[in-house]
Amino acid sequence: MKIVSAKVIVTCPGRNFVTLKIQTDQGIYGIGDATLNGRELSVVSYLQDHVIPCLIGRDAHQIEDIWQYLYRGAYWRRGPVTMSAIAAVDTALWDIKAKAANMPLYQLLGGRSREGVLVYGHANGKDIAETVDEVGKYIDMGYKAIRAQSGVPGLASTYGVAGDKMFYEPADAALPTENVWSTPKYLTHTPKLFEKLRDTYGDGHEFLHDVHHRLTPIEAARLGKSLEPYRLFWMEDAVPGENQEAFRIVRQHTVTPIAIGEVFNTIWDAKTLIQEHLIDYIRTTVVHAGGITHLRRIADFAALHHVRTGSHGATDLSPVCMGAALHFDIWVPNFGIQEYMRHTEETDAVFPHDYKFENGYLIPGDTPGHGVDIDEELAAKYEYKPAYLPVNRLEDGTLWHW
Ligand code: CS2
Ligand code: MG
């Protein structure tokens, strides 16, 4: 089965998405997500100018060989742009193979290991009272696991606290907006939020929290320790991940489970973290970590070290990524949890899909392939709009981690 053409589709149904569509000589096509938030057009160019010309005429069934060709063959390895482009090709090829086999993708990976994929939703509020109410709404919707983020007294805005409670969209301006951050204020405030959540809702739900890479190792250790009484499912991205050894300090001090990986793009970003048992959950996902082929490699390595998966699933990962991730999740033996931020109705209409939310779980459908398509006519109506993530400064003006 030969690849005869491939094209990149850019659309903005409320936010930007980049999708690769690969067509074969047997009339079967596959699609893959290539969205890199705030840097979308660099992946478009990487695909159009450097990848697509190398794909034409290749056997669409040779997923592994094509992966190696794009990774090793480019000489310049790794990085979010390269790995998102490779992921898009890989996802589209798995979609094609599964359609050719007339099977849902999870069957090719090894079949279902579970009935549904446990997901967590995002509750947030301007203060503790509002956040506690928002968590209650997620509980009412059937969620078993909920991430909670709250505004911090004395800070005008905080990561994860949204205007629109259902559809949080951090890439909110044509040029980056600026937020102000104070670690001391945050560290004093956050344990109070989780204390209130446990007091209000008891022990029946999992609670998660995202620190968004804002602490030093010893500060993260302190936060993890202060959250221990409230039994978090995980503390996410406590420290920037470039220096993996930094997590040794966090690990020495706290038994709060540790998750990281949404900005990682290969197994090398997590090698020390995993092999030294410094984390509990690896958050790499299909689009930013080289597709199903590479994610499987990361998950297998993680399984040897008792690390489970917890894939990133924010709104900037398109329904195409979510569909593929769910096929992966329903199979992967060391599954932990899947993030699920709902897409808007406009986005869902551009990307018709067969996965559904039921009682705290997402269930992939049985359509051959990964179960997500793109309505190109509708996609064409939404033109690309520059949109950036914010930047973050300390109260004295120092640029900090967003
Ligand atoms: C976040 C994301 O979902 C998460 O855990 O950290 O909202 C992240 O900030 C965005 O996906 C960035 O593109
Ligand atoms: Mg995060």
Image: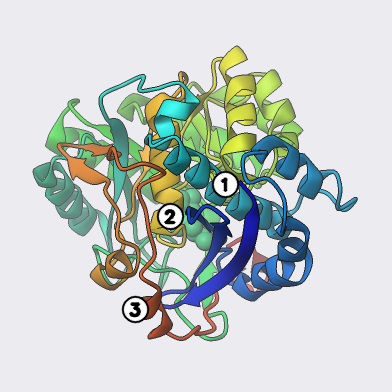
Out of 253 and 206, give the one closest to the viewer: 206
Residue 139, quarter of the rendered image: top left
**Where is residue 379 shown, x and y percent of the image?**
40, 77
Horizontal relation, residue 213 to residue 107: left or right: right
Q: SS at mark 3?
A: helix
Q: CA distance from mark 2 to mark 3?
A: 16 Å
Q: SS at mark 2?
A: helix
- Identify the residue under disc 2: 320
Of the image marks 1 and 2, the number of the one nearer the N terminus: 1
Identify the residue at image location x=40%, y=60%: 315
- Identify the residue under disc 1: 93
Q: Amino acid at mark 3?
A: Leu
**Where is residue 384 shown, x and y percent of the image?**
50, 83
**Tag 2–tag 3 contact (CB < 8 Å):** no
**Where is residue 266 shown, x and y percent of the image?**
70, 41
Q: Is mark 1 within 8 Å of ligand 1?
A: no
**Vertical arrangement, residue 394 with respect to residue 358, above or below:** below
Q: CA distance from mark 1 to mark 3?
A: 24 Å
**Vertical arrangement, residue 9 with respect to residue 234, above or below:** below
In the image, farthest residue toward the left: 140
**Tag 1–tag 3 contact (CB < 8 Å):** no
Out of 378 and 191, give the one closest to the viewer: 378
In this rendering, the label closer to the viewer, 2 or 3: 3
Which circle marks residue 247 in the picture?
Answer: none
In this rendering, the label closer to the viewer, 1 or 2: 1
- Identify the residue under disc 3: 378
